[in-house]
Image: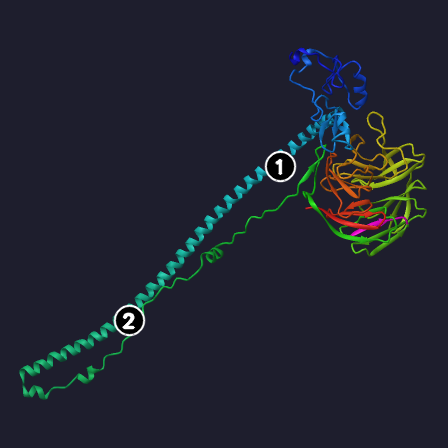
Amino acid sequence: MSRAQDAVRCSLCSEVVVIHCKSCDVNLCGQCVKPHIDRNLSIKHEILPFTSELFDPEAEVQKCKDHPKQPCDLYCQDCNVPICSRCLTGNHKRHGAVDLEEICTTTRTMVKEDLEELKNFQKEYEKIVKSLKMKAQKYTEHCKQEKSSLQKIKQIWHETIDRSIQIIEKRLDGMLEEDMKCYQDNIEEIQRALERVTKSLKRNENLLRNDNSFTLLEYESEVEELRLVPARRDIKPPSLHPKDVQEEAVVQQLVSLEFSVRSSLPGFTISKTGQVCTVSTRVLVEEHTLLATIKTECSKLKGIQCESKERVWVYGEDEKLRLLDKSGSMLNCVTAISGNSQKDIALNKDGEIAFSHKTEECIYLVRNNKMEKLFCTPGWIPYGVSFNVDGELMVCMRRNDHMESKVGIYREGNLKKEIQFDETGKPLFSASRNNMYITENGNSDICVSDWNACAVIVTKKDGEFRFRYTGNLSRSFKEFYPHGIDTDSYCRILVVDRDNHCVHVIDRNGKFLCFIACTLHDPFVLSVDSEENLWVGECDTGCIKVIKYLD
C-alpha cells in the first residue's frame, strides 16, 4: 500500500492527525495540540483542521539512525544530530539533548531573524559594490589623465631634445666653417710655395738646356729659401660622444612615478537595525599561547578588568582594588568597604570603577581614588556589573530572599530598564544566591552567565530572549558552571567554566566554537584587553594568565 493511502499520523505520537499547526508546520492529533502549544508559548500558533491537501506524500518522519523503528524527537547538541529517546542510554549518554521540535522552532525563528538581517546585509554589500565600482571608474579616469599628462611631458622632452640637437648641429657647422678656412689658408700658402718651387724648377731646367754662360752668371739659388716648408695647422675633426646613461636613469630625469598605494580597510559588522560598526577580522587559532603569568597579592581572586594591553584592575577577598602591570607590580591600590561583600567590578570610559556591595545592596563608584555611593538596589543584592556602550551600568541582581533574579540598567544612578522575564512570563534567570556576571556584546546583545542555571542567557538590548547556552560536555563529564564573561570585537562570547578549568568560546548566536584551557587551574573571572588577548583570573592561585587566542 502506498504512503498516500495510509492514515497520516501525529508528529508527536502515533495517533491519527486531525490538526495542522501552520506556524510550526507540524501535524497533530487532538491530544497533542495543547502540549504542543504549551511547549512553544513564545510562538503565535495558527491551528488549522488537517486536510489531505496539507499532506505531502513525499515527506517522511525522520527515523533514528541507531534505532530505525524510533522517530527522532530529540537533538544532541554535542554531536549536532537528531536522535531518539533511546539514544540517551546509548551512544549519546550524558550528551546535552533538547527537544527536536523546540530546536526546530528556535531555528525557524532564527531563520526569520536572519532573513531580515540578510536584507540589511544585501543593502550594505550593494553599497560596497557600488562604491568599489565608482572607485574603479575614478581610478581608470585618473590613470587616463596621467597618461595624457605623460604625452605632454613626452612632447616637451621631444622638443627639448630637438632644440639640443639643433644647438649641437649649429656648433658643428661653426667648427666646420672655421676649420675649413684654416685648411684653405694652409692650402693657399703651401700652393704659393709650390708655385715658386715649380717656377724655380723650370728656370733651372731652361738654364741647363740653353747653357748660356752670361745667363748662368746671373743665377741666384732659391733652394735654401724653399728648403723650409711653411708651418701649417693640423686639425682633429670634432667627435660626438653619446652619454652612457641607463634607461631607468633617463626615466627618473624625465619624470617620477609615485606608485599606487594599497591598504586594508577593516571589516565591519551590520547590526539588526542595519547600523554598521568596525570590527577585528582576526580568527581563532588552533593552538593557544600563554603570553604571561602574573602573580597578584590577592587572596581568592574574584574580579578583573583590563584597563589597557599592559594594565589590569583586580580584587580579591581582602577587599582591595589593585591596578597592576604585566610584571605584577602594583601601580595603584584602593581599599574598598570591608566585610567581604564586594561581588564584581566594572570600568567605564573615564577610567572610573564601579563595584557591587552585597551587604549594603548598593553600587559604589571609585572616582579619583575616592569612593562614593552611586545608587542603591533596596531589596535586591547586586552581583555582576558592566558598562554598556552608552555608558549605562548593567547590574545583575537577586532578591534578598533569593527567590527572584533580574538585570537592571541604570543611567546616572536611575533605573531605566529591567530584564527579568521572557515573552511568556517565565523567568529568564535562576533563583539562587550564587554568582551572576554580565557583559554587552558588539551587536548590543546582553549576555549573562548564571551559575545556578548552568547557562549563559543572551537577550537583545530590549530584553527579548535570544538563546540559552548550556555548555558543551564533549570535553568533560562535569557540569557547566559559568562564571566571568566577556566578548571580543568579532562578537564572540567568552565565558569561564570553573569546574572544567577552561574557557568556552561561542559565537553571537550561541554556537560552540572552541575551548581555551592553556594550563588554567580554577579559573574564575576574565577580561579581554585592547589587543584582544584574554586575561583569566584564577581564584585559588591568585594568578592571572594572559592568553593569545586570536591570529
Percent coordinates x, y for residue 401 in the rendering: 94, 34
Q: Secondary structure at mark 2?
A: helix
Residue 197 in the magenta stretch? The answer is no
Query: From this viewpoint, is residue 412 visible?
Result: no
**Crowd around label 1: few <14 · some 14–19 · many ≥20 (10 Å):** few
The residue lying toward the viewer, choosing from 343 and 546, is 546
Q: Which mark is residue 182?
A: 2
Task: For marks 1 and 2, give the one nearer the viewer.
Answer: 1
Left or right: 85 in relation to 322: left
Q: Is residue 530 above or below residue 120?
A: below
Percent coordinates x, y for residue 430 in the rendering: 86, 33
Residue sitting at x 44%, y 51%: 154
The mark nearer the N terminus, 1 or 2, is 1
Q: Which mark is residue 128?
A: 1
The residue lying toward the viewer, choosing from 252 and 187, is 252
**Alpha carbons under labels 1 and 2: distance apart:** 80 Å
Residue 311 in the magenta stretch? The answer is yes
Query: From this viewpoint, is residue 326 visible?
Result: yes
Left or right: 458 in relation to 405: left
Percent coordinates x, y for residue 6 in the rendering: 68, 12
Percent coordinates x, y for residue 235 in the rendering: 30, 71
Task: Give the residues drawn in magenta, as a range.
Answer: 310-317
The residue lying toward the viewer, choosing from 343 and 27, is 27
- At label 1, the amino acid type is Ile
Q: Secondary structure at mark 1?
A: helix
- At label 2, the amino acid type is Cys
Q: State yes or no: discs 1 and 2 in contact (Cβ < 8 Å).
A: no
